[in-house]
Amino acid sequence: MSNDTVWQEYIENNFDKFISSLKSDDFISGEKEIISDEDINFLEPKKTYDCLRKIITQDAIKKLQNRFRAHKHREKRGIKNLQLKSHSLNMLDKFKAQVGADTLEEAIDFLLSPDYREYEHDVDLAKQRLGEGNFDSTELMLDSFTKRLKNYDRERLSLMIALAFNEGWRAAKQTKKRTGNPRQEALNQSDLYNSVVKLIARSNNVD
């Protein structure tokens, strides 16, 4: 496949999305514009860039050049299988949508490739939004939390989890109640849980 053919296929699938991702200051006029396909020559990269220079800034053109360069690199590399847990794939899909990536491969490029340095602000914003989300994964929540701790604190956390598990095990064997909400009532009677709740309450009152 010739370079021009690769370009034409890429631009056909990604041009509108790229233009939509631009901000007002990416346009020479200082305002977002609708660019008609009839005004742009898409036969080869140079002709396309020459047309775009009349409408968008050189920095914006550089973004398109970098994204196309990364696309060609992915095409040459070929496709490999990548195994991910469902919640990780969910996160990557959400990140892909946040930054306007065309594929999951490009989403990873947004995170790692030097060709996407211009999108650092968009990447940071997407990561912040995702960090505030709930992906329904206890494993992910614990992993994110424990990475912030020192090793000594991780050991203490493992002991607290063991204490909570053993406390729950004993409570489950002792209770015979099946009406109401026995699980919540048992939690409310947990010494370990109540100690943490009281500590949080005291901290909130001090703040």
Image (cartoon, rainbow, N blue to C red):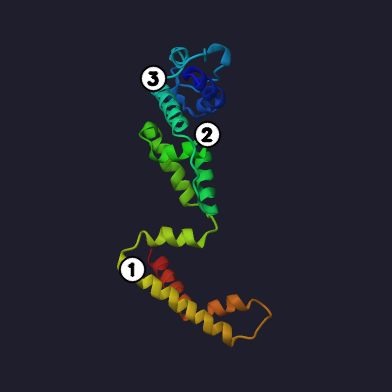
Q: Quadrant of the C terminus?
A: bottom left
Name the residue beneath numbered marker 3: 58
Farthest residue, direction bottom: 174
Label 3's element?
Answer: helix
Foreground: disc 2 or disc 3: 2
**Which of the numbered marks, if any, corresponds to residue 153?**
1
State the CA–CA distance, disc 3 to disc 1.
50 Å
Look at label 2 and name its amino acid: Asp
Determine the residue positioned at 39% across, 70% down: 157
Determine the residue positioned at 59% across, 75% down: 184
First reached walking from the N terminus: tag 2 or tag 3: 3
Residue 80, compared with residue 21, is above or below; it is below
Report x, y in % for residue 194.
47, 77
Q: Could you say which quadrant of the image residue 172 lies in?
A: bottom right
Q: Is residue 195 visible?
A: no
Report x, y in % for residue 15.
53, 24
Look at label 3 and name its amino acid: Gln
Name the residue beneath numbered marker 2: 102
